[in-house]
Amino acid sequence: MIKARGLARRFATKSGPVDAVCGVDIDVTEGELVGFLGPNGAGKSTTLRMLTTLLQPTAGEAVIAGHDLLTDPAGVRRNIGYVGQKNGAGADQRVAEELEFQARFYGLSKHDARRKVADLLDRFDLQGLEKRGVITLSGGQQRRLDIAMGMLHDPRLLFLDEPSTALDPQSRRNLWDHVKQLKADGTTVFLTTHYLDEADFLSDRLLVIDHGSIVGEGSPDELKNNVSGDLVVLGTLQAALVAGKFENAVVEGEKVSFRIPNGDRALPGLLRDLDNLGVELHSVQVHRPTLDDVFLTMTGRSLREPANAF
Amino acid sequence: MLSKTLLRDTWLVFVRVMLPVLRNPVAIVFGLAQPLLYLGLFGPLLGDTGWQWFVPGLLVQMALFGTAYAGFSLLPEVRTGVMERLRVTPVSRIALLVGRVGKDVVLLVVQGLLIMLAAMLFGFRATPGEILLGLGLVALLGVAIGALSYAIALKVKLEYVFASVLSSTIVPVMLLSGVLLPMSNGPQWLYWLSRINPLAHVVDAERSIFNTGSILLGLTSASALVLVGVFYGVRTFHRESA
């Protein structure tokens, strides 16, 4: 569905050229839900804008939904949906009218457009808002309207740029359910996010980007397994003895913590061994690594560091 | 170039921007306030015979002020994701510009007609043919200035920059066009300065329509402005990543 090779974008700025994206390869197969994860300024949006014809790449090539990005951008546009970071409905427009115009911009007849709009109003919980002015909608409603506008022509491939930014937790959750449903209906989804929980919850596969290059790739579980292993915390009065058995173990009072790969599977055997040594445990915890741990190990910085904000 | 899709897209863009105006026609009335003030508070200074000379100039002034500010309506759509969302659809980029300009020109023509009718109460005289021709020339100018306005707005992107671009160009262009007083009354240098202003020729032509004289030079000037405006506008809409 997406096959990009060496896609790059260089911006000319007053202080010299800046490589926002330096030659990324992206492969997405039909039906996948791929998350594109990275801190602000890592090149996520720039990549997305190139993949959706909004921005000319300075190098590289790509085939999107069966059409060549460079030679047939119109073909790409007809076959993809795109929901940008910012709200895409005109403030002075009415909900149903804006949807209908959008459908007609994609070439649908008036009749087909009306039918499709009714269908999507229903699907994205926007019934009853048809005649409302866009400006009167809540943040969550506007976001759902944005996604509906990206789906009017039944694209097989949908791009979402930071879909849940500025939404309250309930609207976010609701949005996630809609995105999952799109995937269940067979749409290929490519979304950017800088929220780890979002990437974790939604994506089959993740691409991690930092400083304009892809630094990691895999399912959320794979990435977590590869990188840091699970954190095991054992509570025991014989902390020093237990700590001696594991590499890089940290003792804090009656708690010993250390990392091992696949902690949930390793734990039963590990407990048996400790039992055989006569160690008495009063508590056991296993923490899966978070994507933040993953990101930290891959890039040496945390996604949450404010220093990344620009 | 002039394909069925382009016409359809242009019509859709036109209707999309026209509907909010029709829902809230107060804006059209407010657009009439300024020319009405000129008509009522400035026109009488020119005496009874002045109307035939003044009203055509006022129409050109309306075309200038009415469409030069059109770009402002684009800036919120650039700042939010509206333009971006439209640019990802297969809709013609030319239609995105021309449909909008179409809305401004239709409003301009309606307002121009109303002003002429109001002026007739004061003593302005015009045949239906003259009114039609007069509005046609004004519409041509509106297309040119509207297209330029959208293109410049898309280029500068910031309201306060756009506002200072407008105020620093519109006022000299208007003063040197002779809409308020005849340029021939002034010193030679000022008259010759006005001759290099294409708008002055459009004003002369508009006056010729309702009096006597040739409209050739003004029509040529307006057409040349349309070519420049639309070419620059289309190019900007194609290039600029909104």
Image (tube, coloured by chain):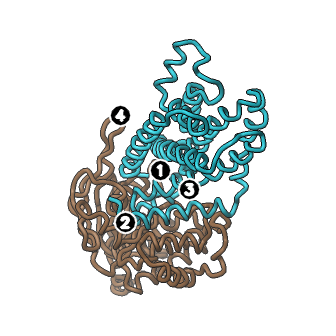
Mark 3 lies on residue: B103
Mark 2 lies on residue: A36
Q: Nearer the viewer, mark 2 or mark 3?
A: 3
Residue B24, picture quadrant: bottom right
Does the rendering let one see residue A229?
Answer: no
Mark 4 lies on residue: A15
Q: Colour of chain B?
A: cyan
Against A137, is B235 above or below? above
Against A231, is B50 above or below? above
Residue visible at 65% across and 50% down in the picture: B113
Pointer 3 local density, CA inside 10 Å: few below 14, some 14–19, many at least 20: many
Does the rendering let one see residue A307?
Answer: yes
Q: Which chain is brown?
A: A
Residue visible at 53% across and 13% down in the picture: B188
Q: Tell me the CA gap for discs 1 and 2.
A: 17 Å
Q: Tell me the CA gap for discs 1 and 4.
A: 20 Å
Residue visible at 35% across and 60% down in the picture: B2
Mark 1 lies on residue: A309
The kind of residue on which mark 3 rests is Lys
- The answer to whether dots 4 and 2 both sit on one chain is yes
Find numbered disc 2 in the image and state the secondary structure of the residue it sits on: strand
Q: Earlier in the sequence, mark 1 or mark 2?
A: 2
